[in-house]
Amino acid sequence: MLVSVTGVLTAQELHTVRTHLSRAAWSDGRLTAGYRSAAVKSNLQLPQSDAGAQEASDIVVRALERSATFISATLPHHVFPPLFNRYEPGMAFGAHVDNAVRQIPGTAHRLRTDISATLFLSAPGDYDGGELIVEDLYGTHSVKLAAGDMVVYPASSLHKVEPVTRGIREAAFFWIQSMVRDEGARTLLYDMDTSIQDLTRKGADAGALLRLTGCYHNLLRRWAEL
């Protein structure tokens, strides 16, 4: 399931994050890639030890906590602290699959990467190329969103970032371990939750909505791993 989440960051939050990024020292992105990914990765990345990167990461996490669409689509159990990358002209990230497990730096905690997320920080008009390409059972999807918008998609999918040919593309990226491991079950729950919200806005019968909401929570209770 590929879901676009609009307006994750407010204009002020986006400005603050980009200010932190403008003052930071970028490093070779291959330093955090696995063996196979490093062979096709050409970008810059902020070290997690960078104070500005940590401040920006905290802003993103707080924004995620208030995003109803993000919560509904991912049912997050653990969120990897957001990282930040930068693509300059000629840089790209070839086709790859994200590592199945990530260890949160400075801790003993490991996270299963059920879902990948890219939060766009640069406006689409600021750069050419740089589309995120995601392949799944339903075909190939090209994603290039407004600054402050985010896309979430299965971490198991084959994906890449097309070469940037003009300007600079900056983004936050991270992974989510969902309470519901199975992608099909997550998709069903997301569709059901979205339908409940739509029916509520349209003034559907309260009793029917209550029963449908009960079905949603009983399915979540059955499938959730805590």
Image (tube, grey):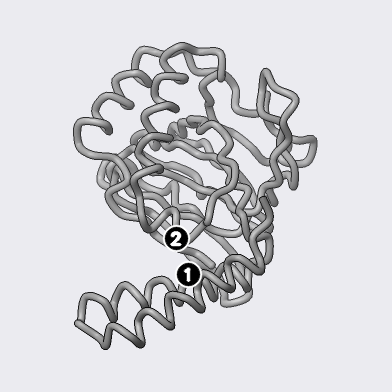
Say which amino acid is labelled 2.
Ser
* SS at badge 1: helix
Left or right, 140 with reference to 41: left
62 or 3, which lies in front? 62
Instruction: Return the residue at label 2.
Output: 72
Mark 2 neighbour class, 10 Å CA radius: few under 14, some 14 to 19, many 20 or more: some
Residue at the location (44% across, 52% down)?
Answer: 131
- Residue 109 position, x and y percent, is 72, 30
Left or right, 204 with reference to 180: left
Residue at the location (54% across, 67% down)?
Answer: 1
- Residue 49 image-quadrant placement: top right
Q: From what the image shows, is residue 69 above or below residue 117?
A: below
* SS at badge 2: helix
Mark 1 and 2 residues: CB-CB less than 8 Å, in contact?
Answer: yes
Mark 1 neighbour class, 10 Å CA radius: few under 14, some 14 to 19, many 20 or more: many
Q: Outermost residue toward the right?
A: 35
Say which amino acid is labelled 1.
Tyr
Left or right, 27 with reference to 214: right
Instruction: Return the residue at label 1.
Output: 190
Of pointers 1 and 2, the one earlier in the residue sequence: 2
Q: Outermost residue toward the front?
A: 207
49 or 34, which lies in front? 49
